[in-house]
Amino acid sequence: MSAISREDVAHLARLAHIEMSDAELDKMTGELGVIVDAIASVSEAAGADVPATSHPIPLANVFREDVVGETLTVEQVLQNAPDSEDSRFKVPAILDEE
Amino acid sequence: MTEIIKLSAVELAQKLRAGEVTSVQAVQAHLDRIAAVDGGERGVHAFLHVNAEEALAVAAEVDAIRAAGGAGAEALHPLAGVPIAIKDLIVTVGQPTTAGSKMLEGWMSPYDATVISKIRAAKLPMLGKTNLDEFAMGSSTEHSAYGPTRNPWDLDRIPGGSGGGSAAAVAAFEAPLALGTDTGGSIRQPGAVTGTVGVKPTYGGVSRYGAIAMASSLDQIGPVSRTVLDSAYLHELIGGHDPRDSTSLNEPVPSLVDAARQGLSGDLTGVRVGVIAELQGDGYEAGVQARFNESLEVLRAAGAEIVEVHCPNFKYALGAYYLIMPSEVSSNLAKFDGVRYGKRVIPADGPVTIERVMGATRAAGFGDEVKRRIILGTYALSAGYYDAYYGSAQKVRTLVQRDFDAAFEKADVLVSPTAPTVAFGLGSKTGDPLAMYLNDVATIPANLAGVPGISVPGGLSEGLPVGIQFLAPAREDARLYRVGAALESLLEKGWGGPLISQAPDLASAEKEGVA
């Protein structure tokens, strides 16, 4: 397993939508390298015949009746919004305007 | 009159029923205690928000119902009028919920968590919201964006985490009961280092609806208290099926209070207790190991059969946890993007697009540990690494479950130290994330397998509390309460009272600090 590079971290930060300064990228790269080294042995622990477990206590097909349940009012939904207009969330431009 | 704040929840409930104390008096006594020890430079800082007005109003309502007598008073829940503190990861109408993060500063939930609805229905006055590592990520409460909580046993040490606020509040007599959440040990490890009791129920045993999700396949809400019996009462109150949590077990809550009362007799004849060979020795402090060994002797003397069990795959549990948990974190925390609620930061320069707003918002709103875990999770889930990391970790999860299955064929409950060390100094591990992660080495396997666990006080090492952890098969939470209560009552006979009564007197320590 290759160690995690600074370029990897910069790419991951972009994917995760977290802006990072150069200093933060340096620090994060070092810390993640140590952590990834420490947990890398996990990849050799289990053979191909071991099934994966996603949930500790598996439940299947949890359904409810197809009826309207509790809902929030528009006021409740928007009470914490950073910005809103006409009963909608308001955000800055979605696309770059060149 | 015995000081109200020193009473256990069950003792206080008895006095409320007998009319010796009113709920308003009980709530006021705890609010006074919070005012005396929580604030200031050297305060415990267990609370992020104090909910005095509502708590007193609920208390007055309980007192009025009781005074009126009749069917209304009869119908009151056994814990009605007993105040409780809530970990600030659990959403509450009328009180802010921050998750210990700047991202949610000032956020007011438009709905209650299911456990909060149950607490309201049973009329437990809510004293306020307790401090935690940001989004419950940490083992020391030092990752809170609002400053660390201090350990009431030594104000220069950590109270554990992530639920250090709830544990410290209970240890400092600021509340008899609290709610916590446990993803890798966040209820049990703070219980251990503060000399209190904390329980992680079976996965699905308590609804998580309204607990801000960190890692959904691991998170579990549970009780925090000073006695095993108190936790049993609270667990029965908050447990049970909830259609709003699709991972909630559709089964009745087991009788936990009865199990705790049975345990208090101190008789464990015929109970097989499995000592997990892999969770002791190397890496565990000598003082922790000594208290652990003494507890085994106490259990043996009570009639328990002590057997050794091996869980060879537990050595991979920490690594698997630090792949699965961050993976789920990276997904669960994607919703904090500055669009619908929470912080929004506009970039200082350049074009203002939503993409750049998200990047700036998450850069400013999240602390270092949260960013580390999001990036680590994004890495573990990314193309080319998914099979090697996330996929392998899920297989390890299966191996850990098999270890538990084999161990529970030989033993009714398993036992280990809850944490490898006593409370360490504030700031001593914040620069070394990996060292911090190792605090949870003994508590993580239970979360991976979904089995329940309890931490009970096991004595002191160098004047600081040591926790003893019991684990039981899924759905067998009652066994924890029986064995936990038995160990508690037998150890207290030796100590001449609860361990917590040996904690330093904070009120006087505070005065000395000021002088």
Image (spheres, rainbow, N blue to C red):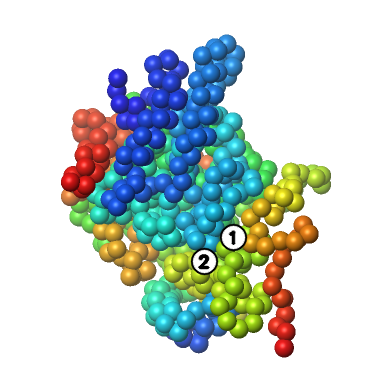
For mark 1, does the 10 Å Cα neighbourhood hold few (<14), some (14 to 19), or many (20 or more) residues? Answer: many
Marks 2 and 1: CB-CB under 8 Å? Answer: yes
Q: Which residue is mark 1?
A: B342
User: Spatial distance from mark 2 to mark 1, Cα to Cα?
Assistant: 9 Å
Q: Secondary structure at mark 2?
A: helix
Instruction: Kindly identify the amino acid type of the residue bearing the numbered disc 1.
Output: Gly
Is residue B133 toward the left or the right of residue B240 in the image?
Answer: left
Is residue B237 toward the left or the right of residue B250 in the image?
Answer: left
Q: Is residue B388 above or below residue B120?
A: below
| Residue shown at the point (59%, 50%) measured from the top left | B108
Q: Quadrant of residue B437?
A: bottom left
The chain ID associated with circle 2 is B
Q: Which mark is residue B365?
A: 2
Q: Is residue B485 above or below residue A98?
A: above
Residue situated furthest top in the rendering: B70
Considering only order in the chain, which callout, 1 or 2, is on the residue closer to the N terminus? 1
Q: Which mark is residue B377?
A: none
The chain ID associated with circle 1 is B
Q: Position of residue B266 (x, y in %)?
A: 31, 29
* Label 2 and label 1 in one chain: yes
Q: Nearer the viewer, residue B356 or B122?
A: B356
Q: Position of residue B184 (x, y in %)?
A: 44, 56
